[in-house]
Image (spheres, rainbow, N blue to C red):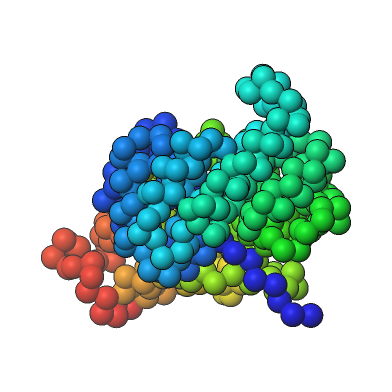
Amino acid sequence: MEKRRIQIFDTSLRDGEQVPGCKLNAKEKVKIAKKLEELGVDVIEAGFPISSPGDYESVQEISKNISHTTVCALSRAMEKDIKIAGESLKYAKYPRIHTGIGTSNVHIRYKFNSTLDKIIDQSMEAVKYAKKFVEDVEFYAEDAGRTDNQFLSKICENVIKCGATVINIPDTTGCCLPEEYGKKIQFLMENVKGIHKVVISTHCHDDLGLSTANSLYGIINGAQQVECTINGIGERAGNTSLEEIVMIIKQNPHLNFFTNIKTQCFADISRLVSKYTGMKIPANKAIVGINAFSHSSGIHQDGVIKKKETYESINPKDVGVNDSSIILTARSGRAALKYRYQQIGYFLKKNSLDLVYSIFLKYADRKKEITDKDLETILEKANLIKNHSSRLSSDISRHVI
Ligand code: KIV
Ligand code: ZN
């Protein structure tokens, strides 16, 4: 069976930047956008131009600086928003307007005080108006996760008639279960007239920690685009993490999907986004967390030293990490200690290792992590070397002791 390409729509600069305290200026946004282009994303959602002059400027600058990736601007289903979005994209080689409206009962009743019919009309008008500015118009049915499937089908059918090229089915509140979200996509694929003319997109939030699983079920059931962010940043608990969904696709060839993403860029772009947004990457974050390729318990370290695959299912080099690391803590065993000594140039015989290990454990009980400098201090304490400060740690000539 031929592999199906999944398009990656990055919204770090729009949904990601909505996070409190995350504000990015135009220069920072352009730098990140260029990196996203190098990474190989298909679409960069650059901002929400009507929201502020700064965001308008960011979308405009990104449009000028991006050459082969689609640049997208968000708008509500309102003429003034769409017009501003269209103007901000004037310099984009491949512009896209992303317009839409809340479609769930709770949005229609309480947010808009509207009716189902009026929401359909407003959606159609918005898409038709956006088509005056750009050919590529994506429609979002906000809170589609809680929208009745029959109504969702009707709205999709109507916006397709008006020329929508992409339809986004957001699980805005992150409440769907993977199977439920997958069935929603399947229902649309089977019931919406004209659906095969458009790209169906997922946009899943992480309120229950299910955003990546939901996106996966979305593509398994027919969606062709995933909306996601670097490091999973985004409103509240965040969005689907780009690096997670892409690595799931890469690590599971039997799914028969592929993306155009250069996964070796993950470590760099993850750090860049974290630095500019000020959003720290949790140490245990999949793929890009500092602990994602660190081994600290004795049993795991022993396995990894013998054969990496015992405790590593992903090759760190595939995501831009040079190598996995063996962290020395009080839970480490002799194999890890010996290995770390070898890395700094000391080859310990059995008796030396036994002696050093008992001193190491006392140190490790006091300290969270043992550094290379600590390792040399331990050798001094064991009278195996003299005055390690005279020896540079970078001097890794061979010392058998
Ligand atoms: O979560 C959401 O529904 C959104 C839309 C504006 C696409 O971010
Ligand atoms: Zn969102």
Name the image quarter holding residue 357.
bottom left
Is 174 on the left-hand or right-hand side of 362?
A: right
x and y, in percent, of residue 139 in the image: 62, 47
Residue at the image point whose x is 22% and y is 74% from the top: 395
x and y, in percent, of residue 15 in the image: 49, 42
Is 127 on the left-hand or right-hand side of 94?
A: right
Question: Which quarter of the rendering shows the N terminus?
Answer: bottom right
x and y, in percent, of residue 172 in the image: 64, 37
Question: Which quarter of the rendering shows the C terminus?
Answer: bottom left
- The total of numbered circles placed on residues is 0
Residue at the image point whose x is 49% and y is 42% from the top: 82
Is 312 on the left-hand or right-hand side of 377?
A: right
Q: Nearer the viewer, residue 283 or 251?
A: 251
Q: Nearer the viewer, residue 174 or 129?
A: 129
Residue at the image point whose x is 71% and y is 76% from the top: 3
x and y, in percent, of residue 281 in the image: 44, 46
Q: Is residue 182 above or below residue 119?
A: below
Q: Nearer the viewer, residue 383 or 60?
A: 60
Residue at the image point whose x is 65% and y is 71% from the top: 5
